[in-house]
Image (spheres, helix red, strand yellow):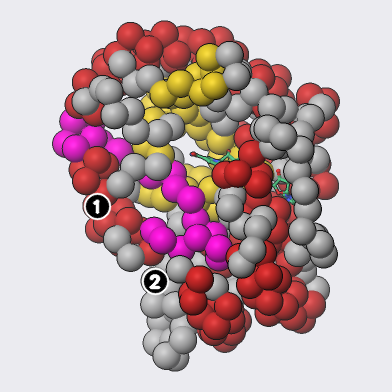
Amino acid sequence: MQYRSLGGNGPTVSVVGLGTWALGGDAWGPAHDGESEDAIRAAIDAGVTLIDTAPAYGDGRAEEVVGRAIAGRRDEVVLATKVGIRRHGPHHVVDLSPQAVRREIDESLRRLNVDTIDLYQIHWPDKKTPIEETVGALARLHEAGKFRFLGVSNFKPALLERARAVFPLTCLQLHYSLLNRSAESHTLPGCAKHGVGTMGYGSLAGGILTGKYRELPHFGPGDARGEFYRFFCEPVWSAAGRLLETLRAIAHERTRPVSQVAINWARRVPVAGGGAVAPARGGVTCALVGARTAAQARENAAAGEWELSGEELSRIERAWRAQIAPLR
Ligand SMILES: NC(=O)c1ccc[n+]([C@@H]2O[C@H](COP(=O)([O-])OP(=O)(O)OC[C@H]3O[C@@H](n4cnc5c(N)ncnc54)[C@H](OP(=O)(O)O)[C@@H]3O)[C@@H](O)[C@H]2O)c1
């Protein structure tokens, strides 16, 4: 596993992180807690240090699962959770008011069964609360020792700047994969310029970039994959299939799974002196990847053992420009 510093002021983290959205059991079909805990432990055994969760994942269930899985191994992980989205009946409510933030952190600490959170992230912007009020409240919780580093998620650059003016930001979490490169034009360069680390979610586009789907899957009602990752529909589905031909060829040559090619693309470093189609910019500091089983967690973590060459990145870039870019 390779490790990097998360932003200018942050902790060292594995380049592949473990995401736990599916482990909440309410957004990706059922989850089985024993299997979920095994997945988390397998990721840690394979060198993953960054574990990302949130109260919104299963209304606290994913945090409890993480808490049980890391019991006795607290020092091996950089524990990242979030604030600002809670369940209200069947709906999710965004609330970043100072009162909500103060209440939520204590609930997360209890569910995770830890004294402090390593990376506390604002999950989504809240139009009702000025960000300065939220971050001001968080700064006081930091003084009280309840978390070590602050991050934001799904923030546009202007909002990130306002938050950063109140308290140092370690990281931005954002949607980033071969099927969503919208962050490349402004967001990723802005973060790099200001020393803010980046964590990309949906590195496998909800599973498509593993190459495991030969036919368009149909998910049940309430399953977020088809709604949140809008790639399980045409025309993206077929274009992704054609892009996958290139990922499959590289995976075959490397005797690696397709999933690892997609993950390694997301956390690539810029290609120095590359040709006209080599990506001039790098990817994210840490590619977050969800896993429901120990086997998936091990497979994904092993992406942190190797890197794509400049030539391979150029091939992927050419395929992306031919298949995905025209859809934007
Ligand atoms: N900040 C935010 O707003 C936000 C939003 C989304 C996600 N996130 C975070 O980012 C993490 C990663 O994103 P994600 O989980 O949404 O999507 P993802 O990583 O693109 O996809 C994960 C899913 O792909 C399947 N999978 C994973 N590894 C596999 C393998 N090796 N072989 C076959 N299938 C495999 C699993 O689902 P199946 O087994 O069901 O196919 C898994 O749940 C989340 O878990 C969460 O922590 C944050």
* Viewer-side residue, 59 vs 217: 217
Q: Quadrant of ligand 1?
A: top right
Spatial CA span between label 1 and label 2: 16 Å
Marking on residue 15: none
When the figure is inspected, residue 271 is found, relative to residue 84, above or below; the finding is below
Point out the stretch of residues depicted in magenta. Answer: 162-183
- The image quarter containing residue 233 is bottom right
Q: Which residue is mark 2?
A: 281
Q: Secondary structure at mark 1?
A: helix
Relative placement, left or right, of 116 versus 35 is left
Q: Position of residue 102 (x, y in %)?
A: 37, 11
Please, what is the three-letter code of the amino acid marked with disc 1?
Answer: His
Q: Position of residue 315 (x, y in %)?
A: 59, 84
Q: Position of residue 21 (x, y in %)?
A: 63, 35
Does residue 175 show up magenta in the picture? yes
- Outermost residue on the bottom side: it is 275
- The image quarter containing residue 112 is top right
Picture mark count: 2
Q: Residue shown at 31%/16% (left/top)?
A: 97
- The image quarter containing residue 22 is top right
Q: Secondary structure at mark 2?
A: loop
Q: Residue shown at 51%/45% (left/top)?
A: 13
